[in-house]
Image (cartoon, helix red, strand yellow):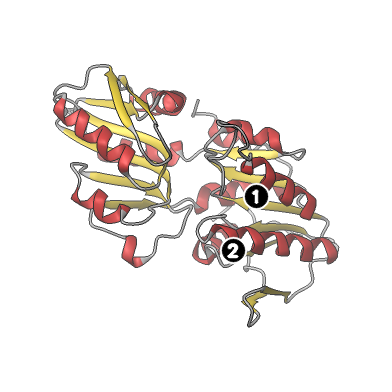
Amino acid sequence: MAEEPAKGMKIFCGNAHRELGERVADYLGVELGKSTIAKFSDGEIRLQIDESARGNDVFILQPTCAPTNDTIMELLIMLDAFRRASAQRITVVMPYYGYARQDKKVKPREPITARLVADLITIAGAHRIVTVDLHAEQIQGYFALPVDHLYGGPIIARYFEETITPDEDVVVVSPDVGGVARARSLAERLKAPLAIIAKRRPEPNKVDIVEIIGDVDGKKCVMIDDMIDTGGSVIQGAEQLMKRGATEVIVSATHPVLSGNAAQRLQDSVLSKIVVCDTIPISSDKRFPKLVVLPSAPLLGEAIRRIHLNESVSGIFDNWR
């Protein structure tokens, strides 16, 4: 539980991940705000805020995960309701930012959907954004609002610090060149060397391994990424690492998107363990023996407490570079 429950603060959540909302509220020592979210007969979202929010510091927890279009629309409707209810400040706590992978134009006539979502959230009435491990950090600049970008790395690092024994020869692996900074931070925390998988994507959700940079022979490999979607990238990476002499491959990621049959593919793969955070709800049919789920509520709850009390949020990560 947080050091002190904050007065004048209210936490609400949508339907995307109510369990996480309840755990965050428990951490802060407050009751989860009362609201009713249902659907009209034609599928439109019906929302009713069941308590006063006038003059309060309101936090809306809603990862915009699958079904992404529904969770985004639900969030926008909640923002409009609290703006009209005279909330003093409205902070959107988005553990997972949907549409983040469409962050730039790669081909002619493509949208930049990550910017569109940012515009919608801003116009709907948000005053501040809290999110975790954006797929592309430049998305922070899409908002003309303060954005607190949290990192799941310390949660994952703590798990490995507690489970890896001193006699194990470990190397941290970045699954692509873009994730080197994240992998380097974990490598420094674990006092382990770094390796990089160079790859190319001929099309979305397809990957070709080009080269592995670094020594993995005879080592336990720990891959770290921001998300696992279909699992194809990390599975192919793990297979190549094993061919290069790795003794074991573990993959860790903040967001368990787990689309389609990813859960079964990961269970059947050469990976020994898949370590993720609970920023996205994981249904029972997507849980499998190799999956380890770490709690994110303390991280989100501490960020909320600090924002409400006007304390430094970056101070949470003083030991994480």
Q: Is residue 207 above or below residue 187?
A: below
Q: Residue at x 59, y 59 (%)?
A: 69
Q: Amino acid at mark 2?
A: Asp
Q: Amino acid at mark 1?
A: Arg
Q: Is residue 297 above or below residue 82?
A: above
- The span from disc 1 to disc 2 (Cα, nearest Å) is 28 Å
Could you tell whether 50 is left or right of 63 in the image? right
The crowding category of the residue bearing disc 2, from other C-alpha atoms within 10 Å (few below 14, some 14 to 19, many at least 20), is: some
Q: Earlier in the sequence, mark 1 or mark 2?
A: 2
Q: Nearer the viewer, residue 3 or 275?
A: 275
Q: Residue 70's mark?
A: 2
Image coords of residue 64 (percent x, y): 57, 55
Q: Is residue 162 above or below residue 292?
A: above
> Quadrant of the rendered structure where residue 205 is?
top left
Q: State the residue position of label 1.
A: 305
Q: Nearer the viewer, residue 19 or 302?
A: 19
Image coords of residue 107 (percent x, y): 56, 31
Image coords of residue 175 (percent x, y): 35, 30
Give the mark toward the camera: 1 or 2: 2
Q: SS of the residue at dot 2?
A: helix
Could you tell whether 153 is left or right of 112 in the image? left
